[in-house]
Amino acid sequence: MASRAKATILDIAREAGVSKSTVSLVLQGSGLIRPETAVKVRKAIEDVGYVYNRGAANLRKAHSNVIGMVINDLTNPFFTE
Protein backbone atom coordinates (compact mmCIF):
# COMPACT_ATOMS: atom_id res chain seq x y z
CA MET A 1 0.00 0.00 0.00
CA ALA A 2 1.47 3.34 -1.04
CA SER A 3 1.65 5.96 1.70
CA ARG A 4 0.39 9.44 1.02
CA ALA A 5 2.99 12.19 1.17
CA LYS A 6 2.72 14.64 4.05
CA ALA A 7 0.81 17.81 3.27
CA THR A 8 2.91 20.96 2.90
CA ILE A 9 2.26 24.68 3.16
CA LEU A 10 2.17 24.78 -0.63
CA ASP A 11 -0.66 22.21 -0.62
CA ILE A 12 -2.62 24.36 1.82
CA ALA A 13 -2.00 27.50 -0.24
CA ARG A 14 -3.29 25.81 -3.39
CA GLU A 15 -6.36 24.45 -1.60
CA ALA A 16 -7.20 27.83 -0.03
CA GLY A 17 -6.26 29.92 -3.07
CA VAL A 18 -3.75 32.05 -1.18
CA SER A 19 0.04 32.46 -1.11
CA LYS A 20 2.47 30.37 0.96
CA SER A 21 3.26 33.52 2.92
CA THR A 22 -0.38 33.91 3.90
CA VAL A 23 -0.53 30.30 5.10
CA SER A 24 2.67 30.83 7.10
CA LEU A 25 1.27 33.98 8.73
CA VAL A 26 -1.93 32.15 9.69
CA LEU A 27 0.10 29.30 11.23
CA GLN A 28 2.12 31.84 13.23
CA GLY A 29 -1.07 33.50 14.49
CA SER A 30 -0.30 36.84 12.85
CA GLY A 31 -2.92 39.57 13.11
CA LEU A 32 -2.02 40.81 9.62
CA ILE A 33 -4.40 38.36 7.92
CA ARG A 34 -8.12 39.10 7.56
CA PRO A 35 -10.27 36.80 9.70
CA GLU A 36 -12.16 35.51 6.62
CA THR A 37 -8.88 34.53 4.98
CA ALA A 38 -7.62 32.87 8.16
CA VAL A 39 -10.82 30.79 8.35
CA LYS A 40 -10.37 29.73 4.72
CA VAL A 41 -6.75 28.73 5.38
CA ARG A 42 -7.65 26.80 8.56
CA LYS A 43 -10.33 24.90 6.63
CA ALA A 44 -7.76 24.04 3.95
CA ILE A 45 -5.36 22.87 6.68
CA GLU A 46 -8.04 20.51 7.95
CA ASP A 47 -8.99 19.35 4.45
CA VAL A 48 -5.44 18.41 3.40
CA GLY A 49 -4.58 16.88 6.78
CA TYR A 50 -1.64 19.17 7.53
CA VAL A 51 0.05 18.68 10.91
CA TYR A 52 2.16 21.60 12.15
CA ASN A 53 5.57 20.37 13.29
CA ARG A 54 6.49 22.49 16.32
CA GLY A 55 9.92 20.84 16.56
CA ALA A 56 10.80 21.87 13.02
CA ALA A 57 9.56 25.39 13.67
CA ASN A 58 11.75 25.64 16.78
CA LEU A 59 14.80 24.55 14.79
CA ARG A 60 14.28 27.53 12.47
CA LYS A 61 14.22 29.93 15.41
CA ALA A 62 17.16 31.12 17.47
CA HIS A 63 15.62 29.58 20.61
CA SER A 64 13.19 26.84 21.58
CA ASN A 65 12.60 27.45 25.31
CA VAL A 66 13.92 23.95 26.06
CA ILE A 67 16.73 23.22 28.50
CA GLY A 68 18.79 20.07 28.01
CA MET A 69 20.63 18.25 30.74
CA VAL A 70 23.38 15.66 30.43
CA ILE A 71 23.84 13.36 33.41
CA ASN A 72 26.83 11.07 33.56
CA ASP A 73 25.52 8.39 35.94
CA LEU A 74 21.88 8.10 37.03
CA THR A 75 22.75 5.46 39.63
CA ASN A 76 24.84 7.99 41.57
CA PRO A 77 22.54 9.81 44.09
CA PHE A 78 24.56 12.99 43.67
CA PHE A 79 23.36 13.41 40.09
CA THR A 80 19.72 12.50 40.69
CA GLU A 81 19.04 14.92 43.57
Image (spheres, helix red, strand yellow):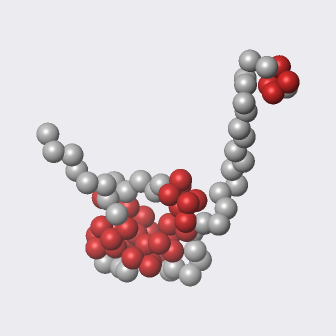
* Residue 45 visible to the viewer: yes
Query: Could you say where residue 54 lies in the image, as x and y percent from the top left?
Result: 53, 55
44 versus 70 height, above or below: below
Work out which residue is located at the far front of the displayed protein and give it.
Answer: 72
Query: Could you say where residue 33 lies in the image, as x and y percent from the top left?
Result: 51, 79
The answer to which image quadrant residue 13 occupies is bottom left
Query: Could you say where residue 10 lies in the image, as x and y percent from the top left?
Result: 33, 71
Query: Could you say where residue 14 lies in the image, as x and y percent from the top left?
Result: 28, 73
Q: Is residue 41 left or right of residue 73?
A: left
Q: Is residue 1 left or right of residue 75?
A: left
Q: Residue at x 36, y 79 (%)?
A: 18
Work out which residue is located at the far left of the displayed protein and give it.
Answer: 1
Closest to the observer: 76 or 6? Answer: 76
The answer to which image quadrant residue 63 occupies is bottom right
Screen quadrant of the C terminus: top right
Q: Is residue 16 left or right of residue 75?
A: left
Q: Residue at x 34, y 63 (%)?
A: 8
Q: What count of labels does the image hold? A: 0
Q: Residue at x 47, y 55 (%)?
A: 53
The answer to which image quadrant residue 79 occupies is top right
* Residue 16 visible to the viewer: no
Q: Is residue 43 left or right of residue 27?
A: left
Closest to the observer: 63 or 26? Answer: 63
6 versus 74 height, above or below: below
Screen quadrant of the N terminus: top left
Closest to the observer: 72 or 8? Answer: 72
